[in-house]
Every structure is written in C-alpha cells, then in structure tokens.
C-alpha cells in the first residue's frame, strides 16, 4: 500500500528516497567538524555553524529549520527529513536547500527510531518531526548522532538538545496598496542552550529575505547579534 506513494515521491524532479541516496551521502560527507549555515544564522550557533554530533531544536518555524539546511546541502552535504509529511519542497528550494540532496521519509510510523538511526549513519543532517520520539528514544538518537558525526535537528522540543532556536514574529511585507506579493517576513530568533551556547542571544532577521535566504534585518547593524537583556538569574 505504501509503495505507490513512495514511488510517486521518488519520481519528483530532484528528489530521491533515503535508500537511493544513502551510499552517495556517505561518499559525499565533508570532512570538517562544522557544517556551514547562512551568515545571518551563524552568530546564533556556538560554533558559527552546525557542529557534527550535535542536536539542535527549532521552535516555531519550519522556514528557519529549512534555512539551516541550505548552506550545507549547497556545499555538498546530504540531509534527510523524517516524520514531516507537510514539508514543502518548493519552499525548501526557495530557501536555498539543494533538494537533489534531500531524502524524505514522510510517515515512518512505528519504524521511526530505526529509520532515523539508519539515516544518522549515512547522512550529514537528519531532521525529525515534532513529538516524534519519547525521551528515552530521543536520548538514544542524540547519542547516535554524536557517535556518527551527524547533526540531528528537531522541529519542536527535543530532550537534551545542545542548542534551541526559537523563532517569533511574522510581519510580512511586499504588498503595496492592496496589491503585489508577500516577499519578506521579519522575525526574531532567540538562541539558548548548554555549554558554549548557554548565553542567550537574539537576532532580527528577514526570513525569507528578498532572495529567499535569511538576512539580518536592516534594523540591526550588519553581522551583529543582540544579547538578550534578561539575565538567567532573574528567571
């Protein structure tokens, strides 16, 4: 029953299933310990990129999650998305994701832990859907990512994530006197985490920007992030 939908998915231009790209992904893995991200996002991450072996939780925005994949896939890394059946490939491409290096497993069902573990063995980045794993399974998968040197990204909360990115806002622009197209959206992304990511940071971004890729908002000085004023001790 599942074969027909998967066959249709694999037939889409530039899209492959996990089994079709696993060997190529292993061959194409870059040797560096940090996978690149857009300059607008680099300052929010402790290693200015996605550190291999880390787990990152993204809250409030599928666009932000896709933007995190863009630079790495464009540079040759392979990514997989598990348990996000509503993912839009057109939106991913507009945000800069190289969809030819993107494997999709939209509905893994009860096989989610096994599928995700297998993908962490062969992919550079693996995205998982919100609420996809119980805490014990989540810890095992994070440990698998550390062991295999992959990056695990969660769309929503994930127990033990080293970095959490929270996207809020959503003021769109582009319409003029009731006509035109929505082109850019201004958001605030807040980052916090453990260890080197413990200091809260914030950045105002256009996501998407006029070209699709995220850019720092014109309100903020170019390349500069804002440290959140709220102190941890006050919480």
Image (tube, rainbow, N blue to C red):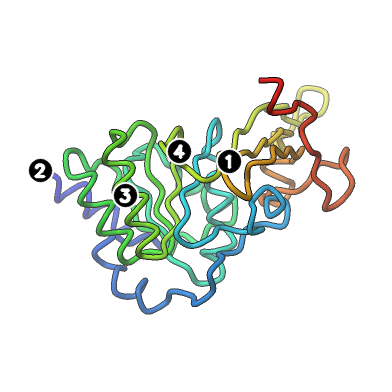
Residues tagged 1 and 3 counted as in contact (Cβ below 8 A): no
- In this view, the residue in front, 133 or 142, is 142
Badge 2: how crowded within 10 Å, few (<14), some, or many (20+)?
few
Quadrant location of residue 206?
top right
Residue 71 percent across, percent down from the top left: 59, 62
Residue 46: mark: none
Front position among marks 4 and 1: 1
Q: Earlier in the sequence, mark 1 or mark 2?
A: 2
Tag 3's secondary structure? helix
Vertical arrangement, residue 52 with respect to residue 84, above or below: below
Tag 4's secondary structure? strand
Vertical arrangement, residue 65 with respect to residue 78, above or below: above
Q: Write down the residue under mark 2.
A: 1
Residue 26 percent across, percent down from the top left: 35, 74
Q: Which of marks 1 and 3 is nearer the N terminus?
A: 3
Q: Write down the residue under mark 1.
A: 193
Residues tagged 1 and 2 counted as in contact (Cβ below 8 A): no
Q: Earlier in the sequence, mark 2 or mark 3?
A: 2
Front position among marks 1 and 3: 1
- In this view, the residue in front, 81 or 13, is 81
Front position among marks 2 and 3: 3
The residue drawn where x is 57% and y is 52% is 68
Q: Along the horizontal axis of the image, is 80 left or right of 23?
A: right
Residue 184 percent across, percent down from the top left: 72, 38
Gap in Å between the C-alphas at discs 2 and 3?
A: 28 Å
Gap in Å between the C-alphas at discs 1 and 2?
A: 42 Å
Q: Earlier in the sequence, mark 4 or mark 2?
A: 2
Q: Which of marks 4 and 3 is nearer the N terminus?
A: 3
Q: Write down the residue under mark 4.
A: 155
The residue drawn where x is 74% and y is 41% is 205
């Amino acid at each position: 029953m599942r074969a027909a939908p998967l066959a249709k998915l694999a037939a889409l231009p530039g899209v492959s299933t996990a089994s079709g790209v696993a060997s190529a992904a292993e061959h194409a893995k870059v040797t560096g310990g940090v996978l690149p991200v857009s300059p607008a996002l680099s300052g929010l991450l402790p290693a200015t990129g996605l550190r291999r072996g880390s787990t990152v939780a993204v809250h409030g925005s599928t666009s932000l999650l896709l933007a995190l994949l863009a630079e790495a896939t464009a540079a040759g890394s392979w990514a997989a998305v598990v348990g996000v059946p509503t993912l839009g490939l057109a939106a991913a491409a507009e945000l800069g994701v190289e969809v030819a290096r993107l494997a999709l497993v939209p509905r893994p069902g009860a096989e989610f832990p096994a599928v995700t573990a297998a993908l962490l063995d062969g992919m550079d980045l693996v995205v998982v859907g919100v609420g996809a794993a119980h805490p014990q399974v989540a810890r095992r998968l994070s440990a698998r990512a550390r062991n295999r040197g992959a990056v695990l990204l969660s769309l929503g909360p994930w127990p033990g994530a080293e970095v959490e990115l929270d996207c809020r806002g959503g003021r769109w622009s582009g319409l003029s006197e009731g006509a035109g197209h929505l082109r850019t959206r201004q958001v605030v992304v807040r980052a916090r985490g453990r260890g080197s990511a413990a200091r809260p940071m914030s950045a105002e971004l256009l996501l998407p920007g006029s070209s699709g890729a995220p850019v720092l908002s014109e309100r903020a000085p170019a390349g500069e992030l804002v440290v959140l004023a709220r102190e941890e001790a006050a919480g």
